[in-house]
Image: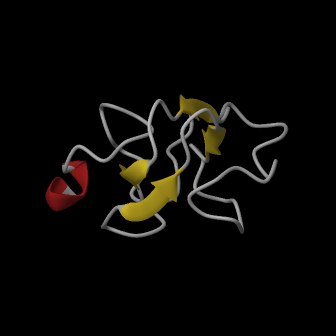
Amino acid sequence: MSEPTIVQKSPYPIEVEAGKSYYWCSCGQSANQPFCDGTHKGSDFTPVKFEATESKTVYFCGCKHSASPPLCDGSHAKL
């Protein structure tokens, strides 16, 4: 499998709304970071669905190397 593009070495703080679904970009090529815009088509990558159970700030991974996608787990500190 291909390596994702590192977009930034920090998370994206995003206000999510309870009951909504968000699709995190796993390839790093989307122009709509941290969310998928379909740029991955034809690659090994697929977006990761995140369902918000409550309205709050969520930290989506920006480096695309989290062991807990789509959320940041601090992996960017090791890149």
* Residue 75 coordinates in the image, percent (x, y): 22, 48
Please state, as top left, top right, bottom left or bottom right, where the N terminus lies in the image. top right
**Residue at point 68% right, 30% down?**
44
Q: Is residue 7 left or right of residue 36?
A: left
Q: Is residue 60 visible?
A: no
Q: Quadrant of residue 30?
A: bottom right
**Residue at point 82% right, 47% down?**
38
State whether residue 54 is above or below residue 15: above
* Residue 72 coordinates in the image, percent (x, y): 30, 47
The residue closer to the viewer here, 79 or 31, is 31
The residue closer to the viewer here, 23 or 43, is 23
Please state, as top left, top right, bottom left or bottom right, where the C terminus lies in the image. bottom left
Q: Is residue 7 left or right of residue 20?
A: left
Q: Is residue 53 visible?
A: yes
**Residue at point 40% right, 70% down?**
8
* Residue 34 coordinates in the image, percent (x, y): 56, 58
Q: Is residue 16 left or right of residue 47?
A: left
The residue closer to the viewer here, 67 or 43, is 67
**Residue at point 78% right, 54% down?**
37
* Residue 65 coordinates in the image, percent (x, y): 36, 44
State whether residue 7 is above or below residue 37: below
